[in-house]
Amino acid sequence: MKNSFLSLIVIAISIISSTDTFSQKFPRLDVSPMDAATYPTHWKNSDKLVKVIYGRPQLKGRALSALAVADTKKGVWRTGANEAPEVTFFKDILFAGKKVKAGTYTLFTIPGENEWTLILSSVRNVWGHYTYDKNNDVLRVSGKVTESEKTIEAFSIAFDKNKDDIVTMFIGWGNTVVSVPLQEFVTEN
């Protein structure tokens, strides 16, 4: 009986100590994870105006100009990493003063020194910019470029509202910040 009990303990310890060799490895995570930004930003507010889902590359000591230019061989930049960002407008809006119907669009950009061209495309679920086709453009607007006081290591998109009730979409990376105003389109009766 004593030998049986001792054998049982040895077997149990062997099984417990060997579980690590049978465990599965967690898949390698993407170095440019996805993120999302919404407006209004507070989680309690379910009446959203806009949401954008995008990939967040890191500078890692590289120059933004080299990264953005290297990715524009097709004439546009995917605006981030991996999948091109998708912007969902939950209501009809004015995007840099131009009307856009509620819906989901892919966001491409053409970086410039003083302004960026922001492109809303009707094609969705796009990886990179490789299948970009100008014929699918819904709208092109200009975004104002300013310089950030601090370096923005991770590519970021955020929204903020000013005192005039104008919401601004900010795209920031490195020392570059691009801003585009948007607001709900209201028809006058």
Image (cartoon, rainbow, N blue to C red):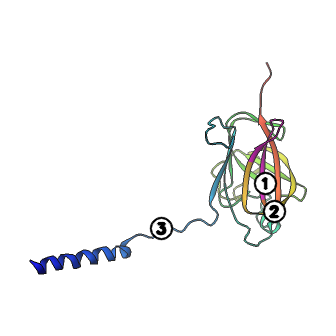
Q: Is residue 186 magenta?
A: no
Categorize mark 1 by other alpha carbons within 10 Å: few (<14), some (14-19), many (20+): many
- Residue at left offset 18%, top offset 75%: 8
Magenta stretch, overall SS: strand
Which residue was labeled with disc 3? Answer: 26
Mark found first going from the N terminus, 2 or 1: 1
**Separation of marks 2 and 3 at Cα, in angstroms:** 35 Å
Image quarter where the C terminus lies is: top right
| Residue bearing mark 2 | 150
Secondary structure of the residue carrying tag 1 is strand
Q: What residue is drawn where x is 82% and y is 46%?
A: 180
Which residue reaches farthest bottom?
3
Residue 83 x/y as whole percent: 65, 57
Query: Which segment did they paint magenta?
Result: 159-172
- Tell me the quarter of the picture where residue 16 sits: bottom left
Q: Which mark is residue 109?
A: 1
Q: Nearer the viewer, mark 1 or mark 3?
A: 3
Instruction: Determine the CA span between mark 2 and mark 1.
Output: 22 Å
Regarding mark 3 in the picture, which secondary structure is present there? Answer: loop
